[in-house]
Image: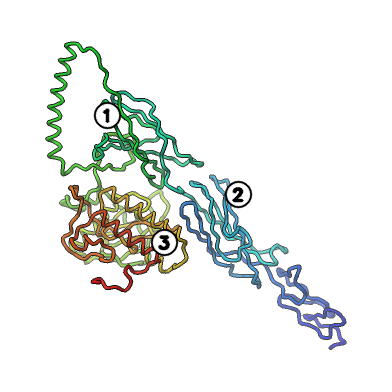
Amino acid sequence: MDSEACQRGFYRHSLETKHCLKCPPNSLSNESGATSCSCNAGFYRAPSEGQNIACTRPPSAPRNVSFSLIGTQLSLWWQPPSDHGGRKDVTYTVFCHRCHFLSCEPCEAGVVFSPSASGLTKPAVDVDGLEAYTNYTFAVEAHNGVSGMGPAPQRTAPAVWVAVGHAAPVTVSQFILTQRDDSSLSVSWLAPRQRSRTSVEYEVMFFEKGEEARYTVKHLLEPNVTLTDLQPDTAYLLRVRSITPLGPGPYSPDQEFRTLPPDTGALSGGVIVSIIFGVLLFIGLLMGLLIFRRKQARRRQARPDYNTSGFDREKVWLKPYVDLQPYDDPSRGVLEFTKELDVSCVTMENVIGEGEFGEVYRGSLRLPGKERIVVAIKTLKSTYSDSQWWNFLREATIMGQFNHPNIVRLEGVVTKRRPMMIITEYMENGALDTFLRENEEKFSPVQLVSMLQGIASGMTYLSEHNYVHRDLAARNILVTRSLQCKVSDFGLSRILENDAEGTYETKGGKIPIRWTAPEAIAHRIFTSASDVWSFGIVMWEVLSFGDKPYGGMTNQE
């Protein structure tokens, strides 16, 4: 064979080569006496690779591109291609586009990729420098040593759409007193700088200095307000916060403004008589008002309702959320605060858990004229007791009165058919404690702290509305696909009585001892302060990736 020409499928580098060599994989010599083997269609050799190297092809597209977004910090990750092309030198490139309506353009230099946007050897990248209230698309492309050599299969995964909300709470500052007299104040402030056109509204709280418990709230569309019917020569404190589609920012520091003294001058006899009559009338009205207020003191609430349907409402003392207790028929109370859904709009798919009242399903909700959405469905088992029925309706009533991005949203209820249902938004990543244990060490400290900020925001909202949760724990926090944490499970929540202590005292029953404050364990007295203690335990759970509080200690210990 040494003196003969090589057969098809074999080759000899040169006449000096003693033996014929078999063509490497994915290559072939079509004639006898070949000195090389050509790559099969769709396969290539890199310029630096010799004839003895197998032919390979470009990789297929990366798979299942996913992301998490916290503020303006984005984490992208994906699965490697199903076909590496027979090579081990696969790398990735990430393409970023900034979109407005249907028009997209490459991202600006301020968007930073870590470790880089190209030449990535691992299927993940962190992105920083995104703008608030802006839409982006990200596509991931796979490469190897023969990419770009002739026609190649699709190497780019479908782009993912990322909508960035607010990066941080928008704070109002720099107040300007534009006009005042003895009964009014006109104040303006600088609107927050925003590069996008997202709407910003404002909420103004004001009260006489030293009378913070008796405040008034106004909702506004513009960064200015005129306060009328004020007392002359009186100091008023004013605080403002902005409200975006994702929720309210923090209140500004109190700003003090004083009305002018009343006009003085010579008074005629008729004016003096009018003043005396007015003073007597005022004293009579004041005494009547004091008597009325004394009778109503226990029922009057000083918290405003954040109803944004009627803006620019002023001097309205709004009530907090209400419980079912005052209702003779709890079903009537439920209908006042929730939306009764037609059962034909609800589809139950598969069981995802067991709740206090019955099974919990993953399903879908399609309301007339709207797209189908994925929902979670709590059901009331057919063998329910009266107390279970009452508590089931009570939880729906509580949820129906909450509206905050860090509290699980109620979509509606089904009470006129069996099984009765509570339908809420669906949280893809489930309970926070389990989610953290399954993803131990996968999140940075910044991501963990951002989770806690979301929980704190939701709990602040509850506290401002005179609610105490009583069972705040990582197991009762649900997590969205974008790692947003939302407070859930209001089975133990209780409205706080409007008394001097602002406490709620239980009548017995089990309490979650590892999450409960000492005074609540000893005396069964729960307040927003005991919720703060529970939040401290939740902080420990999150930063330890779901470890059990107090380790292996018993409840008694």
Quarter of the picture holding the N terminus: bottom right
- Nearer the observer, disc 2 or disc 1? 1
* SS of the residue under disc 2: loop
Q: Secondary structure at mark 3?
A: loop
Q: Earlier in the sequence, mark 2 or mark 3?
A: 2
Instruction: Answer above or below: position of 14 versus 356.
Output: below
Give the crowd class for mark 1: few <14, some 14-19, many >=20 residues within 10 Å: some
Where, by quadrant of the figure, is residue 242 drawn? top left
Determine whether, in the image, residue 203 is placed left or right of residue 165: left
- Dot 3, how many residues are within 10 Å of its Cα: few (below 14), some (14-19), or many (20+)? some
Circle number at residue 234: 1
| Residue for badge 3 | 428
Q: CA–CA distance between discs 3 and 1?
A: 53 Å
Please, is residue 370 above or below residue 283 in the view?
below
- Residue 397 in sight: no
Looking at the image, tell me whether mark 3 or mark 1 is earlier in sequence order.
1
Taking depth in this image into account, of 113 and 258 the one nearest to the observer is 258
Q: Nearer the viewer, mark 2 or mark 3?
A: 2
